[in-house]
Image: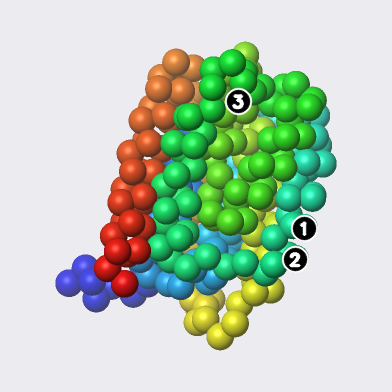
């Protein structure tokens, strides 16, 4: 019975839940949503749908929490993101589904593997520019870079609301680039219809709005602990699925 549900219904439910998760933790929801979309549509259309949905989710979150945004970090992030966005255009690379899932799963573990001595901190100008370069580049190749983005914030002294609001603003920038990149590379792959996009956008607004009160109830320690546990679990699931597709095709 559930399998017979229209794609728009699946997407609506998935986006509400994942947008709420991102609204609370500032990440993780996008990783989960990309994993779900990979089950239904090809890579390039999934990237476009994910990008549109996450732009709305992050953009609306940035609006809701606008007084907490660290605009200096956002500007430096955009400066670093510009060259990272241009580089993949040279090769017009679109990963297959197995590669995308493996990259998706590796992102949180690669972020975790960075040495403690690195002490990356988005509140430092040079680190904010590096954040833009590496996160935007990873966003285009894997579809999601939230766990990597978090590395630049988790060791900072910023309040959790500043973290969520500022990350939302930076991710809105990256998702616009992702939609443009994969939209330009669509070659015959079937795109979901306007009903699916409409359902995803509406669900993103609802889920993001519902998350606000939940974020206020979390302490900064709870916020960081739960974020890490969720992204590692989802990363492991994505990695295993990608490896399974790789060995069985």
Read off the residue under disc 2.
90
Up the image or down, 195 lies above or below 87; here it is: below
The location of residue 149, given as percent across then percent down, is: 59, 36
Q: Secondary structure at mark 2?
A: helix
Q: Nearer the viewer, residue 4 or 31?
A: 31
Marks 1 and 2, how far apart in space?
A: 7 Å
**Quadrant in the picture for residue 222:** top left
Q: Is residue 18 visible?
A: no
The location of residue 234, given as percent across then percent down, is: 36, 44
Q: Is residue 3 left or right of residue 156?
A: left
User: Dot 2: within a 10 Å radius of its alpha carbon, few (fewer than 14), some, or many (20 or more) residues?
Assistant: few
Toward the bottom, the furthest residue is 188
Q: Is residue 247 visible?
A: yes
Up the image or down, 246 lies above or below 160; here it is: below
Q: Is residue 97 left or right of residue 185?
A: left
Read off the residue under disc 3.
153
The residue located at (62%, 67%) in the rendering is 93
Marks 2 and 3, how far apart in space?
A: 30 Å
Marks 3 and 1, how far apart in space?
A: 25 Å
């Amino acid at each position: 019975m559930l399998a017979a549900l229209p794609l728009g219904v699946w997407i609506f439910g998935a986006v509400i839940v994942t947008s709420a998760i991102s609204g609370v933790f500032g990440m993780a929801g996008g990783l989960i949503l990309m994993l779900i979309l990979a089950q239904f549509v090809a890579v390039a259309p999934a990237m476009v749908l994910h990008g549109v949905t996450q732009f709305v989710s992050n953009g609306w979150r940035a609006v809701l929490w606008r007084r907490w945004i660290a605009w200096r970090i956002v500007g430096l992030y955009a400066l670093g993101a510009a060259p990272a966005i241009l580089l993949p255009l040279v090769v017009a690379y679109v990963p297959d589904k197995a590669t995308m899932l493996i990259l998706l799963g590796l992102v949180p573990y690669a972020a975790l593997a960075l040495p403690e001595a690195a002490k990356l901190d988005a509140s430092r100008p040079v680190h904010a520019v590096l954040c833009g370069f590496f996160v935007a580049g990873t966003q285009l190749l894997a579809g999601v870079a939230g766990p990597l983005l978090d590395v630049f914030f988790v060791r900072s002294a910023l309040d959790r609301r500043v973290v969520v609001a500022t990350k939302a603003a930076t991710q809105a920038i990256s998702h616009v680039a992702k939609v443009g990149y994969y939209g330009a590379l669509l070659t015959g792959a079937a795109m979901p219809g306007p009903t699916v996009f409409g359902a995803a956008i509406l669900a993103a607004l609802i889920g993001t709005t519902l998350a606000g009160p939940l974020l206020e109830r979390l302490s900064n320690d709870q916020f960081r602990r739960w974020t890490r546990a969720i992204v590692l679990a989802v990363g492991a699931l994505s990695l295993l699925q990608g490896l399974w597709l790789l060995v069985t095709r």
